[in-house]
Structure formats: structure tokens, C-alpha cells
Amino acid sequence: MAADEASDFALLTAAARRSITDLRRVLQRVPRPVGERGSHFLAVIEATLTALDAAISDREKEFKTAVDDADKRAVVVATRQINSYIMSFHGVTPDIESAAEPTLGLGFIYFVDQLVAHLLKQKADVVMLPGLRYNYTTGFRPFEDLLINDLGMAKYPVSVPPIIVRYPIQEADSLFLHLIVAHELGHHVIDQAQLDQDVLKRDPDSAANAVTFDQAVGEYQKIHKVSAVRARSEIGGRLIDWLRELICDAIALGIIGPSYLLTFAAFSTPLAGPEPGPSHPPVMIRTKLLINLIDTWDWRTTLEAQIPKTFSWMEKGSKRAQEAGTKTYYHRLEEIADRLTETIRQVVEGKLGGERYTRRAYEEQSDELMTLLENNVLPAQLGDRSPSEHRAMILAGWFSAFSRHKDEPAALVKVVGDSGYQSFLTKALEMSALLETWQALP
Amino acid sequence: MIERKSREEGALSAGLLAEKMVLALGRVLRSDPLTDEDKRVLASARDLFETMTSRDVLVFGPRASRMLDDGSYFDALEVVEVQANGDELEERLNRYAELLKKLADGHDPTNAEQDDVRSLRELFTEVGETTLARANEASRAPEDATWRPTKQATSLF
């Protein structure tokens, strides 16, 4: 029996090592010039493989010194778990191969570099990869928790952390949709600065919100027939997740202005309605917050002047009722979110400070940019030879696109489907970034 | 939405925590000396039970300090719920948290406490097996066509 156990265990470790060797071979095939885009991401993958290899060696030592059956069983289960993880890691193969080859227009990549600098105040290795799901995701400091907390690595293996941005594979040219990245980066800002904690700590209605929270827990417990402990965890998790989404929307609107509202409407409205989910508030609650911030941050006149019909449609949508069905506890979460709106604004304003994009900054360039766009001239440079500001270029780009496709909600689809126009704008972003770099040279 | 751990990473973390807990509690039962790593793991498990009984919404926020992803957290809670069999769940969680604190501080369990140490060891054996089963199911899921960039944090729109 003991010999069988040892043989079974040896098979597990051999399988894990074979996978690690296969993945290392893929890494070795990819050229990795030091400091180039993607190289830091690949260095993290290599470090993760090394740490997994070491974890297998650790299990081999533990198996030899296991004292009783429970010890031995635990080591075998953990080794299977490592094996299972390494097998799932095979999915990284196409990303290794495309990490060093940007698949999106350079103009957008430079724009993301700039957003990262504004929001995270650091340099990062921004890697853009196509994904098979119709969604945007970002991964900041990939594998950090695993490496440090679970696999015992003393520190993160690279000093320039990777940010992996994944976009829907069919949307490579959809600059206007890619702006969702501003929201995604917001999640990492929350993480860095614990903005969600800040909002809850500064909650001026904490007593009322505590009562509403307890009501939500009670309703969850009754509807799902679970323990109070589980109901509290479920509701607490939902509240924090909703809160983070709302803070990210506020960050994105704050950093890129109304372009985010339009991107949000174009991306979210076809996919989600007034139905809530455990991780995301329904679209109408998010739109309600965004419209509130449009007013507070003084953008209403711009939107009413440029796209009155589309903006009015968004406002009407924000006033719809949430449709939670039997899950009444989501109405309690909406009550809490409504009470926290002003605090969210204050916390995000405090975090963004002078980085927040303002109507005044836009209007300094908007007339000139609109004229260039109306005449199909690349809006990369202004009359005084200075480079155009990227956020102004994108917002003017949105408005100019509406004038081409008509001011109506359905035009959102036509605008994001106009890949020629978005490639033109992306080229303008690239040229403007180049000009900026050129002019900054000593 | 932000995920501090992908489903696969979360299952691996839970599996490793469960294994370390079984080994550490074995040493407690045999009165073998605990390593620093054992004490760290006992403290992590105590945090887990304290989170389950907390009435403070803030504990669901800083997931940086939570060693488990949501799936593994609820796996662990389910195992305790089954052990408690419908009654005294919070009391049991509080008792476990208190005991783990004492063990991490080097306390030798009394005879009465040894029963709870054995229950905890069984609990973590089951947590390891449950999370492994979930990881295996996930690897067979047809929708798993893509590898998600995992991280310290992944955000999903």
C-alpha cells in the first residue's frame, strides 16, 4: 500500500514538472528584449513557473516526512491542487506569444500609458491582449497574491509591474469602447488607496445604512433560507462590489470626462438593463450616479448643446425603477448606494485632485478640434503647433461622430461600429503623443 | 468588479492553506514544536473565522487581507455549517477563532480543547478536498475558453 501511495505521488509530481517544462519552452521561443513592452509580464510568468516548481519540491519533502494518514492525504490533495493549477496555466500560452506584439493602435496604447500615470502614479508594462469573451478586463500585478502569500516569494519579481488589458477580440478598432479601461484602472486605484473603505468610513448616514443593511441581510436569509452568517457574507460582498463599481464609474468620468458616459451607454445598454446582479448594480443605478456627477462637475450644458436627444434618453433611463424580482434585498442596496452618492463624489474628487478633467480644459481646445474633425483633418496638432490634449480629442471625436451619424441613441452603435473614423482618431492620438515626446526632448 | 484571485488561483490558495492547517494541527495534537509558518497559518485561519462572524461590512472590503477568494470562502463556510448541523454556528466559529489564537500563541490544548483541534483538522481536510473538487469542475467547464489574466487583482467590467 505504501509503495502504491509513493508511486501515485511520483506520478503527480512528474505530470506537474512536465507541464512546467512545456511552458518554459514556449517562453524561451519568445524574444524578450530587456525593458521592452511585455518583457516584465513575461518575467512574471517565468517567476511563477519557478515558484510552482519549488512548491512541488516542497510537497515531495512533506510527503517523505508525513507522520499519519491525515498528513499524507493533505499533501496529496495539495499536490493535485498545484497540478490542477498548472494545467489551467496552459491557457497563458497564446498570451506569452503575443505579449510583445501590440495588437491595438499605438495611439490607444499611449493613451492607456497616460491614464496609468494619471491614476496609479507609476510606470507600468501595459500589455493589450484580445479576449474571447465580450468584456474588458484588466489585471494589475498578475500573480502577486499567489507568489507572495501562497508560494512564499519574498517580493514581486519585477519593478515595473504589468497591467494586462484584455478587450473583445472583434473590437480591436473600437477606440470609443476601449475607454472602458478608465473604469477598469479605477479598480486598481481603489485597491491602492482603499477608496471603498474611505467611502464607508465617511458615510454621513451610517446609522440609517446599518439599519438598511440589516434589513437586506434579513431578507436574504428569509428568501434563500440560509444561516445569518452566510446571509451577512453574501450581502456584505454584494454591497462592497456594487460600491466599487460606482466608485470606478466616478473615477472614469472624473478622469476622461463625458466621453466615459457615452462609452458606458454604448457598451452597457445593449448588454444589461434594470436587473441587478451580485457583482454589478443595474445600469440605471450606474447611469443615475453618472448623471448626478455630470451635473456636479458642470458638464450638462456641453452635453445638452452637442447631443440633446441622446443625453435626454440617458436621463430618462437613469430614472427607471430597478427590477429585482423576488430578490428584494437589492432595493436595500440601492437605498444605501443613493445615500452614499455624495460621499463617493467627495472621495473621488479628493483622490483625483487636479487630474480631474474639466469643462474649462475641454473648451480651451474644443472649437479648434471640432473644426479639424469636420474637415477630416487629423486633430493631432493645434494652430499654435502644440499637441492636442488627448481627452479633448476623444470628446470632440465623440461629438463629431454624432454629427455624422445623427443625435439619437441608436447612433451610439453606429459610432462604435465606424472603425475607419476610430482608426483616424487613434492615429491622431499617436501623432499627438509623438509630438509631445518630440517637444519634450532637450 | 475586482477579483483578487482568479477561480483557479483561489482554489490553489485554499488548497495550500488547508494542507498547511492539517499539518500544523497534527503537530499540535502530537505536541511537536510549531514552526513560524505554522503560527502564521493558524493566524490566517483565525482571521477567516473572525471574518465569518463579523458584523462589520468593512471586513468584506480589504480582500487583500482575505486569504481566500469568494468561492473558497463559501466552501469553507459550508463545511463549518455542515459540522454545526443547523445550530450554534456562530458559537462554533467564535470558539474556533479563540482556540486558534491560543494555539498560535503557543498554548498547549487542554483535553477538552483537543476535540476541537481534531474537528478543525477534519474541517480543513474537507476544505482541501472540496476546493480540489471545485477546481476540477472548473477545469471541465465548457465556457473556460480563455485564460483570464490573474494577479494581485483582476477587474471585470
Image (cartoon, grey):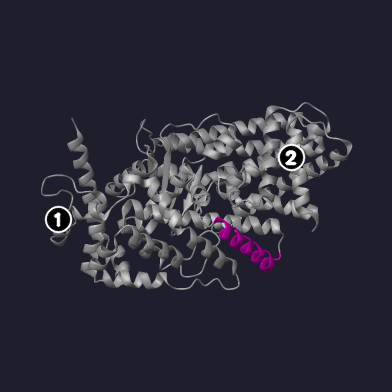
Residue, disc 1: A368
Which chain is mark 1 on? A
- The amino acid beneath tag 1 is Glu
Question: Is residue A128 in view?
Answer: no
Q: Height in image: A162 above or below A213? A: above
**From mark 1 to mark 2, how far is it between C-alphas?**
68 Å
Residue placed most toward the observer, A261 or A167: A261
On residue A74, the disc is: 2
Q: How crowded is mark 1: few (under 14 residues within 10 Å), some or many (20 or more)?
A: some
Q: What stretch is highlighted in magenta?
A: A206-225
Q: Is residue A404 left or right of residue A17?
A: left
Residue lying at the far left of the rendered structure: A383
- The amino acid beneath tag 2 is Ala
Q: Height in image: A241 above or below A163? A: below
Q: Residue at x 72, y 54 (%)?
A: B78
Image quadrant where residue A424 sits: bottom left
Q: Residue at x 22, y 38 (%)?
A: A437
